[in-house]
Amino acid sequence: MFWKKRRKINAGETLKMYIIYTVSILLAVIYLIPFYWTVIKSFRNSIFANFPPDMNPLSKTSLSYFIINLKTVWGFGDFPLWYFNSVFVSIAVVIGSVFVGMLAGYAFARLRFPGRTYLFYSVLATLMIPFPVISIASYVFMLDLNWLSTYQGLILPQIASALDVFIMRQYFLTIPEEVELAAKIDGMKPWQIFFRVSAPMAKPAIAAATIFSFIGSWNNFLWPLMEVHSLHMFTLPLVLNFFKGANGTQIYWNQMMTVNILTIIPTIVIFIVFEKYFISGISLNYSR
């Protein structure tokens, strides 16, 4: 026979499948509600948030209101500069973090040295240390270097990422050593093997590390709040506070939601660009 007989699905498996799909759809709807309200609120002129919220997309919404909100937000203070700060810092963090993660992950996967396993576990243990624990030490270190309110002060403390090291190390373990051995026989030096053979094969892991690093830096609020003392160095998470009244009780919801839309767009673009490699990279990392 040129085909395989299809396995019959019993009633229990069918019920389980329907339950999984139903729960997944309900969770997706719950997660999308805040995003949906953010979008329709940015298309409204009212600064107030009514309770219960009006979720009708055709109620008091207009493209002209969104354009007005967008112009108001973009013309507020140094908003273009603040947006640039977030983009520049996040891209720099991604480049540095992914590169360091690749080097460290490759070393843990391929190099043989005493205490390699214990050192790797020590790196992973840092994932359990919350940032507030080391925030004061990081601030004092930046103060001693005179790096407060500077790009290097915002970028460098975020470059060392144990998660990126873990992702890259797990993926490099899936690459057969015979491939690198063949390159070595062909006369390639170790750095050539890494950059010309191993790194190009690790695109899924690089995509996964890129997404995690970008989102982590883009949404970072606590470190810029501590490190930045100059208005021109603000990033978008800090800018959101400007759309509250002087006493903190009056929030300009339509403008704040417009800022949220501008904030969400880069993360969506990054995920769409790397989505293909991201899924395969995560599946290989955690299946090993």
Image: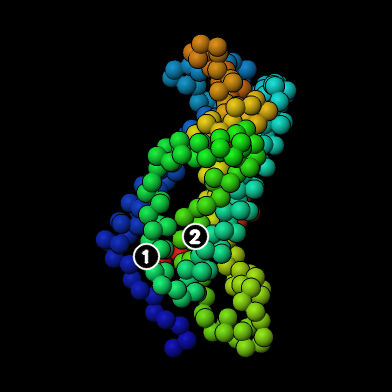
Asked which secondary structure carries label 2, the reply is helix
Task: Determine the residue located farthest toward the front in the rendered image.
Answer: 144
- Indicate the quadrant where residue 125 lies: bottom left
How did the renderer colour the structure? rainbow
The residue tagged 2 is: 165
Marks 2 and 1, the one that precedes in the sequence = 1
Above or below, 185 relative to 90:
below
Q: Which residue occupies the foreground of this view, 188 or 206?
A: 188
The residue located at (57%, 84%) in the rendering is 181
Q: Which mark is residue 118?
A: 1
**Whole-percent x, y for residue 55 in the image:** 50, 26
The residue located at (68%, 28%) in the rendering is 232
Q: Is residue 286 left or right of residue 191?
A: left
- The quadrant of the rendering that contains the N terminus is bottom left
Above or below, 24 relative to 178:
above
Q: Amino acid at mark 1?
A: Tyr
The residue located at (40%, 39%) in the rendering is 133
Q: Is residue 44 left or right of residue 11?
A: right
- Indicate the quadrant where residue 189 lies: bottom right
The residue located at (26%, 61%) in the rendering is 12
Asked which secondary structure carries label 1, the reply is helix
Q: Which residue occupies the foreground of this view, 204 or 62?
A: 204
- Indicate the quadrant where residue 185 lies: bottom right
Can you see residue 218?
no
